């Protein structure tokens, strides 16, 4: 019973931030859509619709993150089968997918390491989402012109890293970044 109570309490505690994470962007999206409906001037109407499209993109990104988070729960992972995959190849592919966003921000995004042969057992969709989130954060918070390097090092261990030369996380926020939705 004690373990069950802790589990239920943990689920309830997690539900509050998740509902907040979804409600806020959806409410903003609704306001933007209503604004677009009220606008009769073509230029203002187009600008309002562009805001709606941007908002839909943010909500879709958040939904993907929430679904990935749900898949990463220990109970779910216990039932997942890990597959043999090439981490270097995956990292190169994901890095290449983010080049257009890097160019939009005048960022230097690159990959270092061998082209292939970094074989691991892992969950490809979760690793892909992990890399995408790390690259997105580096580009988003590193500022225009940031340099971002994705690297896979193969030695006694296989190490994946995403480094940037941005300002970093403020000292007072460093502990909080390990909390969900921060």
Image (cartoon, rainbow, N blue to C red):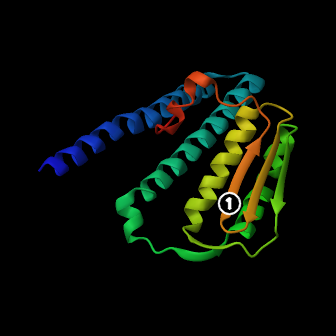
Please name whichever residue, 67 or 30, is drawn nearer the observer in this view of the structure: 67
Please give left or right for residue 165 compared with residue 161 in the image: right
Q: What is the number of callouts on the image?
A: 1
The spot of residue 101 in percent (x, y) is 79, 45
Q: Quadrant of residue 78?
A: bottom left
Q: Which residue is mark 1?
A: 159
Disc 1 element: strand
* Residue at image location 47% in from the left, 53% down from the top: 67
161 over 104 or under it: above or below:
below
2 over 78 or under it: above or below:
above
The spot of residue 111 in percent (x, y) is 82, 57
* Residue at image location 75% in from the left, 33% down from the top: 142
Please give left or right for residue 31 compared with residue 155 in the image: left
The spot of residue 94 in percent (x, y) is 73, 59
* Residue at image location 66% in from the left, 38% down from the top: 53
The spot of residue 138 in percent (x, y) is 72, 40
* Residue at image location 61% in from the left, 24% down from the top: 171
The residue at the far left in this view is: 1
Specify few, some or many for label 1: CA neighbours under 10 Å numbering under 14, 14-19, or 20 or more. few
Please name whichever residue, 37 or 11, is drawn nearer the observer in this view of the structure: 11
């Amino acid at each position: 019973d004690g373990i069950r109570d802790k589990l239920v309490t943990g689920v309830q505690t997690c539900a509050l931030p998740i509902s907040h994470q979804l409600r806020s962007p959806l409410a903003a999206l609704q306001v933007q859509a209503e604004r677009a409906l009220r606008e009769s001037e073509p230029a203002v109407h187009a600008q309002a619709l562009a805001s709606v499209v941007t908002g839909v993109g943010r909500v879709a990104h958040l939904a993907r993150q929430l679904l990935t988070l749900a898949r990463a729960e220990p109970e779910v992972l216990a039932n997942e089968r890990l597959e043999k995959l090439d981490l270097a190849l995956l990292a190169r592919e994901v890095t290449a997918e983010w080049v257009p966003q890097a160019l939009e921000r005048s960022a230097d995004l690159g990959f270092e390491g061998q082209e292939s042969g970094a074989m691991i057992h892992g969950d490809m969709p979760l690793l892909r989402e992990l890399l995408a989130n790390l690259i997105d954060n580096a580009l988003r918070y590193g500022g225009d012109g940031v340099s971002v390097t994705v690297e896979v090092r193969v030695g006694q261990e296989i190490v994946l890293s995403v480094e940037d030369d941005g300002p970093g996380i403020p000292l007072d926020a460093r502990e909080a970044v390990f909390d969900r939705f921060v």
